Image (cartoon, grey):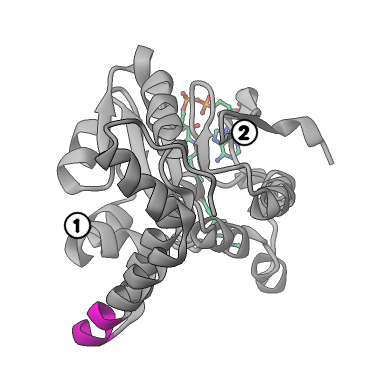
Amino acid sequence: MERQEVSLKKEDGVALLRIERPKRLNALSRDIVKQIGELLEEIEVDEETRVLLIHSEKHFAAGADIQDMAECNEQEAAEFVFSPVFDRIEALPIPTVAAIEGYALGGGLELALACDIRFAAETAKMGFPEINLGIMPGAGGTVRAPKLIGASAAMELIFSGGTISAQRAWELGLVNRLEPEASLFEAAWEFAARLSKKAPLALRMAKKTIQEGLAMDSEIAAVHNESKNWASLFRTEDQKEGMRAFLEKRSPVYQGK
Ligand code: DAK
């Protein structure tokens, strides 16, 4: 396995994960996704990591590696690790941000969709080209894209196999923020670093509560769950610190306790 194809750097509470396979436009081989899974193990247990930022130079990822998939039979295709790894990204208790430049296609877009928030360069291009290869999205695309942009817009993207501009992706709600290409990474990093200074237990609880609420059929049950989770934050030192800091007109210093 070529370990250097995925890198992880940690600074100021932000873990920066990058795919480094420029000759293949960062296409996701099985090994790369396995490596992402291994690095997630590290992130999952690291209490100092407050935010995960996924960004790759020039291209986010031009999809799954077609060479890797071309001769797969059904059993081998089912054994690809994409969905379990992407599901673990979605399930991380900390905020996750994707910063997209260049192509985010197929499995690459699915990787971005597994993150909580997406920044995109104005020049980025996104789409689900799977249909052009005789398959369909299979690592969350048919589930997460319709939730985000509605069933019909997702069907248009998936059925057509076309590529859309970052501007169109922003209009559809597929990405949260558009940035000039030159400042995309800096903007996403600054955002992630800002989140890393927020009360970490409250951030985690907010993410958990939103995800739990989305998974519930009853709005009343979801609001009840929100109230319970909200009250539980009053057990934390961070809540005392946040409110006292406000009253004392100073900046809060959160310990994550
Ligand atoms: N796989 C392998 N190689 C790729 C690649 C890919 N996805 N994308 C690009 N490359 C390679 C090209 O073959 C080329 O290699 P050389 O010819 O230099 O050896 C090199 O990267 C540079 O690409 P191009 O020369 O094509 O660059 P262009 O600027 O002309 O075009 C492009 C850029 C992004 C429009 C084009 O490269 C392209 O159409 N790429 C393929 C996009 C694509 O179809 N992606 C795959 C979608 S299928 C799973 C669930 C989901 C999936 C897998 C498993 N499970 C649940 C198990 C996901 C499936 C997909 O993502």
Tell me where the magenta segment starts and ends, as one range.
217-224
- Quick check: is 14 in the magenta stretch? no
Camera-nearest label, 1 or 2: 2
Q: Which of 136/204 is in front?
A: 204
Above or below, 221 against 104 in this view is below
Residue at 27% in and 40% down: 246
Dominant secondary-structure state across the stretch colored magenta: helix
Q: CA separation, marks 1 and 2?
A: 29 Å
Q: Read off the residue under disc 2.
A: 19
Above or below, 221 against 60 in this view is below
Which x, y percent locates residue 257? Answer: 54, 54
Residue 153, labelled with which disc?
1
Q: Quadrant of ligand 1?
A: top right
The amino acid at mark 1 is Ala
| Badge 1 density bin: few <14, some 14–19, many ≥20, Cα 10 Å | some
Residue 7, labelled with which disc?
none
Q: Residue furthest top?
A: 182
The amino acid at mark 2 is Ile
Above or below, 195 against 212 in this view is above
Residue at 70% in and 57% down: 71
Residue at 36% in and 60% down: 206
- Res. 113 visible in picture: no
Circle 1 SS class = helix
Q: Which of 139/10 is in front?
A: 10
Above or below, 115 against 7 in this view is below
